[in-house]
Image (tube, rainbow, N blue to C red):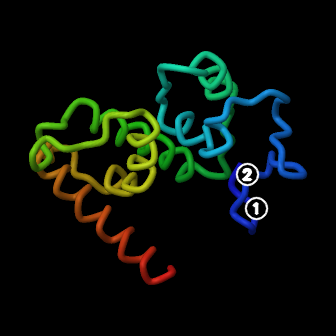
Amino acid sequence: MGYLDSGHCPMLKAGNCSVYVSRPSTCRTFDCRVLAATGLFIDGRWSERINERVKAWEFSFSSEQARQRLRAMKDAACFFQKNAAAFPGGRVPTGPASVAVLAIKVHPVFLAIEADASPREIAEAIIAESRRVEERAGQGL
């Protein structure tokens, strides 16, 4: 679905969510599509309602490459959950929203990684990609 040129969700109409009337406060601060894109769900307050929205998202693809990118996002999220020990100090995000955002940020690693790469090699590639993304953001790219 993407974002508008302003960076806002296209479902935001006159400053309000047009998808459903009574949205959780969490939806005001982040886009639940990050969870849908990575196959993650949340626990806690509002989780039932948020997870309903997450499950309702349907992605369409303009190409096979776009479909592969979504798969790479899900693979990245799964990797973080299963391979924390591959990262220095075992430090990876644990909250679903944080995992999802990082997975989207570094998903290109999972498009290019060799099938026989070790978890440590994948973690190193993720760290390098994360740094590249941060550098580009700092340069306004």
Q: Residue furthest top?
A: 48
Mark 2 residue crowding within 10 angstroms, few (<14) / some (14–19) / many (20+): some
Q: Marks 2 and 1: CB-CB under 8 Å? A: yes
Identified at 23% across, 30% down, the residue is: 82
> Which secondary structure, mark 2?
loop
Name which residue type carries label 2.
Answer: Cys
Q: Earlier in the sequence, mark 2 or mark 1?
A: 1
**Closer-to-camera residue (118/24):** 24
**Closer-to-camera residue (96/128):** 96
Q: Which residue does the numbered mark 2 point to in the structure image?
A: 9
Q: Residue furthest bottom?
A: 139
Provide residue 72's location: percent of width, then percent of height.
41, 45
Identified at 61% across, 21% down, the residue is: 46
Instruction: Specify the label residue 15 is tagged with.
Output: none
> Which secondary structure, mark 1?
loop
Identified at 35% across, 42% down, the residue is: 76
- Relative to 67, does residue 23 appear above or below in the rendering? above
Instruction: Specify the label residue 4 is tagged with.
Output: 1
Name which residue type carries label 1.
Answer: Leu
Left or right: where 114 falls relative to 111: left
Quarter of image, res 108: bottom left
